[in-house]
Image (cartoon, grey):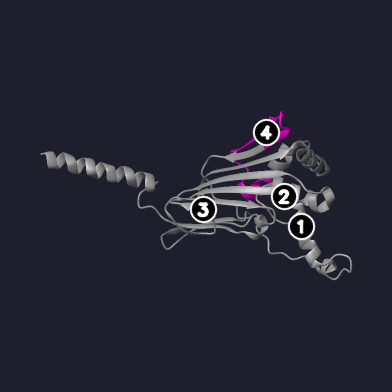
Amino acid sequence: MQKIKVTSILVCAVIMLAIAGAGCLNLKMTENVRVNKDAQVTYMKYSIRMDSPTYNLLKSSAKREGYNSVKELIEANLSKSIGSQNVAYNEVWDKENDKVTVSVERTDTYTPPKESRITIRKENNQIIYEDQSFYSDEKPNESLTKSPYFNETQYEVMKDMMMSGLSMDYYLEMPGKITGSSAATVTDNKAEWHLSGSEMTKTKIYAKSDVPVLPGFTAGFAIIAIGLVFVAFGFFRKK
């Protein structure tokens, strides 16, 4: 069975550890992405909050793969999703609640690498954004489905149990008004997904938006422009 491909190497490591028998884990991921009218990413940040036992599992995984730290593990693998240039890594510990937040941020403008499962393209005056990093339609291999001890249904139940402690909030900002998406919430040029457990592997992140006539022309600019029109109109009427 192929391992589930995910954007963040952190989530990938946690899921693999869970499948290996680590049990249910608690991990919350927040992803923020901003896209421009040229079909490029201008901002991307992954933030993952976990308890210390989960972090220690990641640390052990890093050592097994020959790295000295979680940071090295991420830096060695992150280029597959967002590249290796201008990437900032940070860890913030909340000792009172025994939590740690690991974040990876890129603030420059770039095009996702070819090996990434993130694609951005321009078609018919629209920008289309797709992120299938978490999505997987893979089925268990025949050795599982034909086993008298472990069938496909049991595999799905086990996967759901192992992923029950995982959740993700995904925030996407497009260059123009969003005209179609798989998001739970859409407001003008912004979309949100709030997923948990196996929903993460069953949902394709997708959105398309109009290409703004002017760079950065969104609803906020439209309101300002309309306001200026009324001000100017009032000025001329007084004359």
> Crowding at label 3, few (<14), some or many (≥20) Cα neighbours within 10 Å?
few
Q: Furthest residue to the top? A: 96
Count every numbered label the image shows and give the total: 4
Q: Which of the two discs, 3 and 1, labels the residue nearer the N terminus?
A: 1
Picture disc at residue 91: 4
Q: Is residue 131 highlighted in magenta?
A: no
In the image, is 170 to the left or to the right of 58? left
> What's the mark number on residue 159?
1
Q: Which residue is mark 2?
A: 12
Q: Quadrant of the N terminus?
A: bottom right
Local packing at callout 1 (Cα closer than 10 Å; few below 14, some 14-19, many 20+) is: some
* Cβ atoms at labels 4 and 2 below 8 Å apart: no
Q: Which badge, 3 or 4, is on the more N-terminal residue?
A: 4
Gap between marks 3 and 2, in whole Å? 26 Å
* Element type at mark 4: strand
Query: Label 4 is placed on what type of residue?
Result: Glu
Q: Which residues are magenta?
A: 77-101
